[in-house]
Image (tube, rainbow, N blue to C red):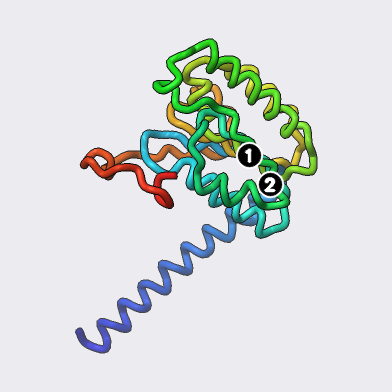
Amino acid sequence: MSEKTVQDKNDRHQARMARKKAIVDEKIRSAQQERGIVLVNTGNGKGKSSAAFGVLARALGHDMKAGVIQFIKGSGTTGEERFFSAHPNVDYHVMGDGFTWETQNREQDIASATKAWQKALQMLQNPELGLVIFDELNIVLKERYLTVETVIEGLSNRPPMQHVIITGRGAPAELIDFADTVTEMGLQKHAFQSGIKAQPGVEF
């Protein structure tokens, strides 16, 4: 490649990045609201809870206080529970009875979800909590153990600067419409499909 060709390529790149910077700078100037946001991580792909706990680490890095409720996960200890439940700025509660195909008891699951939601409402009314994570709440809504109207009402009445992350497959359309940021994680392949068991540090 000649020196002139390299310079032309560099000049085109610089011009393209200058145009992109102008667009991004204008978007930043236009986004001046400051308020708590609702994030929903859904879809069949891996990483919904993992992403939420990544944000939790970020929030703790800013000295924020946080609350976590795991709605479905039950008796099995996870790495995130071991790590974050010991942190002085995290109010951590595992309130599920395990996966629905394990419990096989709808009335028990509804009772557990209702109890967990009462704890969730306490968090949603606590202005000291800058971040709240409701792990697998989408599953609860999908199975109709709680109504989406009940959840949206609680979210609507939270402190103005409180952020909420809701995870789980099958987020209902009403919650997606209500949320500020929604990420749907798609599945292309998963080790489990090849007969590889769930392993600590990656899956739990």
Question: Which residue is the site of mark 2?
Answer: 90
Classify residue 86 as left or right of residue 18: right
CB under 8 Å between discs 2 and 1 = yes
Q: Position of residue 93 (x, y in %)?
A: 64, 36
**Where 70 sits versus 129, above or below?**
above
Q: Quadrant of residue 124?
A: top right
Q: Quadrant of residue 60?
A: bottom right
In-front residue for pair 18/44: 44
Residue occupying image coordinates x 75% and y 30%: 122
* Residue 176 seen in render: no
Residue 42's disc is none
Residue type beneath disc 2 = Val
Most distant residue in the top direction = 107
Q: Position of residue 153 (x, y in %)?
A: 68, 22
* Residue 47 seen in render: yes
In which quadrant is the C terminus drawn?
A: top left
In which quadrant is the N terminus drawn?
A: bottom left
Q: Disc 2 to disc 1, how far (Cα)?
A: 7 Å
Most distant residue in the bottom direction = 3
Q: Position of residue 107 (x, y in %)?
A: 53, 10
Pointer 2 or 1: first along the chain: 1
In-front residue for pair 4/110: 110
Question: Which residue is the site of mark 1?
Answer: 68
Residue type beneath disc 1 = Val
Q: How many marks?
A: 2
